[in-house]
Amino acid sequence: MSYQFDWSVLWSAQARQWLIQGVATTLAISTLAWLLAVALGILAGALRSLKFAPLRMLAAAYVEFFRNVPLLVWMFFWYFAVPPLLPQALQDWLYDHGAEFAAGTAALGVYHGARFSEMIRAGIQAIPKTQLEAALSTGLSTVQAFRLVILPIALRLIVPPLTNETLNLLKNSSVALTIGVAELTFQTRQIETYTAKAFEALTAGTLIYLILCLVIARVMARVERRVAIPGMIAGGGEH
Amino acid sequence: MDFGVIERNWNFLLVQGLVGLGNFAGGTLRLAVPAMLLGFAVGLLVGIGRLAKSRWIRTPATIYVELFRGVPLVMVIFWFWFILPRALGVALPEYGIALAAFVVFEAAYLGEIVRAGIQSVPRGQVEAAESTGLSSAQTMRLVVLPQALRNMIPALVTQFIVLFKDTSLASIIGYLDLTKAAQIVNNREIRPFELYLFIAVVYWLCAYGMSRYAGYLEKRLATA
């Protein structure tokens, strides 16, 4: 191998700036998509636990369709296929304000929302039926019972799988480079293009992803310990 | 809306893009199936390595799994794209690069499935096998793995669905799979809505069909 290593390319002001921007964009798109995914996941997960069939089927259709199609296809769909269907004024606004970022967030959030909802549904199903019956018999409406009793317990139960899925979302945000979102992988490639030092650039990007994953896993482990429910199936095992 | 674009490019999208038969090296299935088989072979070694008594085997296997599970697949594909031709000293087709990247990446995930499968076999089975005089390699091959494999089947089908969807990322380095085929047609005919919706439905049909099959297998295994 006649490759000349030159790690100094990573310390130029330009490369540093690109990497910092890349990390910031990765964190921004991941955070926004995460919020969207959790909201959609809770909604669809709760709807799928209802007795009312039309809503249950609507939620099931959403989950099964979105999670069984590659994220990359959703990226292209949200970026190339959806904007032309919107009103002209909204299209113009989008193209002036970073349509890539918006499309990437939508693709990532809606895709992972379908996956989150499966976990939330599992969390809801893990709660003994008597909890819901008890909540309803105290006079709470179904919505109140879900909001005040079932969901708070379910959300605490699913923290461990949620951690895993959050890391998946972070890693999947790299797919947004295909539609031109300047996230971490995109910036890594950019450094490679400008310096022709692929090995160094890829090493930097890889290490940053590993560190981000490690930090998130640590934080979530803390959350997990704090919210674990002593005595429940999935929680408090270590207490 | 003009869904005629699908009809006009039916063969290119499905025969060439999805299956991989045609004038070009490509195909979603032609990448996904060998990647799964080879990935499982490597995953078997990784999974057994993770449970090895010797630290010299266990630690590298663990690092392998944690490393690849902590990095985006896109990044791994770029790594292989860059490193493999240099390491081997020859220009490689996209197919070789994509296949190598998927095998190595999937082996980390498949290794975890193998490990969980092995751990699901009751300890008593190992003790009984060893007490009949089998060596530990024989115990693994003749007693533990056959039972573990059975337990792994649903998880393996699920992982194959993940791999099947993930192969779309090979289009980033120019591999002609279903997604790339749709991109190429779209560049010519500018019908993004029809084309991307169509391939979404194709992916969905394959993946949903397989996931129903995994569910059926799980039920059958549970009762048998």
Image: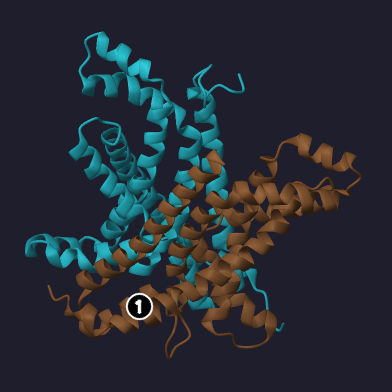
Chain colours: A cyan, B brown
Residue shown at 63% from the left, 61% from the top = B40
Residue A168 pos. (x, y %): 47, 50
The residue most toward the bottom is B23
Residue shown at 80% from the left, 40% from the top = B126
**Circle 1 marks a residue in which chain?**
B
Q: Which residue is mark 1?
A: B14
Residue A111 pos. (x, y %): 34, 52
Question: Can the viewer see residue A92?
Answer: no
Residue A142 pos. (x, y %): 22, 21
* Number of callouts: 1
Considering the numbered disc 1 on the image, is that residue within a helix, a strand or a loop? Answer: helix
Residue A56 pos. (x, y %): 24, 38
Question: Can the viewer see residue A97?
Answer: yes
**Quarter of the rendering containing residue B221:** top right
Residue shown at 38% from the left, 35% from the top = A120
Q: In the rendered image, which quarter contains the N terminus of chain B? A: bottom left
